[in-house]
């Protein structure tokens, strides 16, 4: 009896003291990304966020009855507007293709629940997983940005993304799905918002301001003399 009570207590402690995440059939990860817990004022969602405008996006598939190599998969790229974002949303580059937000994307919903993203501008890219591309199993909630785990078990597809051309306050949200299931919204991915990136003055602008300031100081000294 004591052994049974000890075992039950150990199990309860394990569930209460350690949060374990089940491995979903589909998930997204970003190289060098971090996991954004719910409550962040910028996104307020559980998502893997890129730490720079240029990054590699990884689609991960855990084979099950609903997710097989024979299936076609869809990657939705959707515009996300941070509070206060205004002006031209700009463009971004996906696998070498420049996508203009206003001209190349559709407005609405590709058929996914809203989850704070849709309705918005979106574009869907369809692909198949390569059976030669495998990586060790891991959960992005436990190891965000942890692509490259040794072993096998997950099929992956990699996409190069550059969001440096987006306007201030805009980012791109990614969803992964097929006709039978989709990555949980806790396993989506998103680029960084562009406030901090685009707010940094260009070197030429800084030089011009410095030159103007130096000229103004010289002019005042000349008048005083």
Image (cartoon, helix red, strand yellow):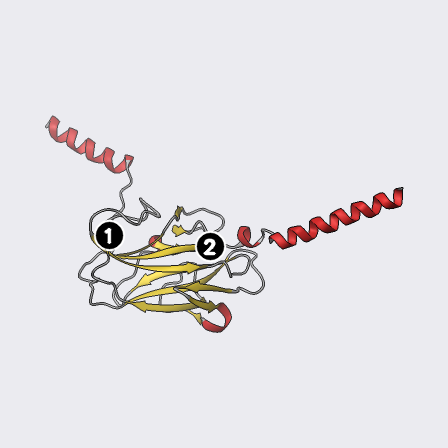
Disc 1 is placed on an element classified as strand
Counting the numbered discs, the total is: 2
> Where does residue 125 sit, x and y in percent of width and height?
35, 68
Looking at the rendering, in which quadrant would you find the C terminus? top right
| Residue at horizontal 70 percent and vertical 51 percent from the top | 209
The quarter holding residue 174 reads bottom left
Identity of the residue furthest to the left in this view: 1
The quarter holding residue 93 reads bottom left
Q: Reply above or below: 93 against 206.
A: below
> Where does residue 81 sit, x and y in percent of width and height?
50, 59
- Cα distance in 3D space between marks 2 and 1: 25 Å
| Residue at horizontal 26 percent and vertical 62 percent from the top | 181
Q: Reply above or below: 77 against 214.
A: below
Instruction: Pick whichever, 202 or 187, lies toward us.
Output: 202
Q: Is residue 212 left or right of residue 37?
A: right
Dot 1 crowding, Cα within 10 Å, few <14, some 14–19, many 20+ = some
Q: Which residue is mark 1?
A: 135
Dot 2 crowding, Cα within 10 Å, few <14, some 14–19, many 20+ = some
């Amino acid at each position: 009896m004591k052994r049974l009570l000890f075992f039950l207590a150990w199990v309860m402690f394990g569930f209460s003291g350690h949060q374990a995440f089940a491995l979903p059939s589909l998930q997204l990860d970003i190289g060098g990304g971090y996991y954004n817990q719910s409550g962040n004022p910028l996104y307020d969602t559980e998502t893997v966020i890129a730490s720079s405008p240029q990054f590699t996006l990884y689609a991960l598939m855990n084979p099950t009855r609903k997710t097989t190599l024979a299936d076609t998969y869809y990657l939705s790229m959707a515009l996300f507007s941070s509070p206060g974002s205004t002006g031209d949303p700009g463009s971004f580059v996906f696998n070498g293709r420049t996508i203009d937000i206003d001209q190349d994307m559709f407005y609405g919903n590709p058929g996914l629940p809203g989850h704070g993203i849709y309705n918005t501008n979106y574009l869907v890219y369809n692909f198949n997983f390569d059976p030669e591309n495998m990586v060790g199993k891991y959960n992005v909630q436990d190891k965000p940005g942890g692509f490259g785990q040794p072993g096998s078990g997950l099929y992956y597809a990699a996409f190069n993304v550059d969001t440096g051309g987006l306007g201030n306050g805009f980012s791109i949200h990614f969803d992964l799905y097929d006709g039978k299931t989709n990555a949980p919204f806790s396993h989506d991915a998103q680029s960084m918002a562009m406030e901090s990136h685009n707010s940094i003055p260009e070197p030429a602008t800084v030089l011009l301001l410095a030159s103007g300031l130096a000229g103004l100081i010289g002019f005042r000294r000349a008048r005083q003399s």
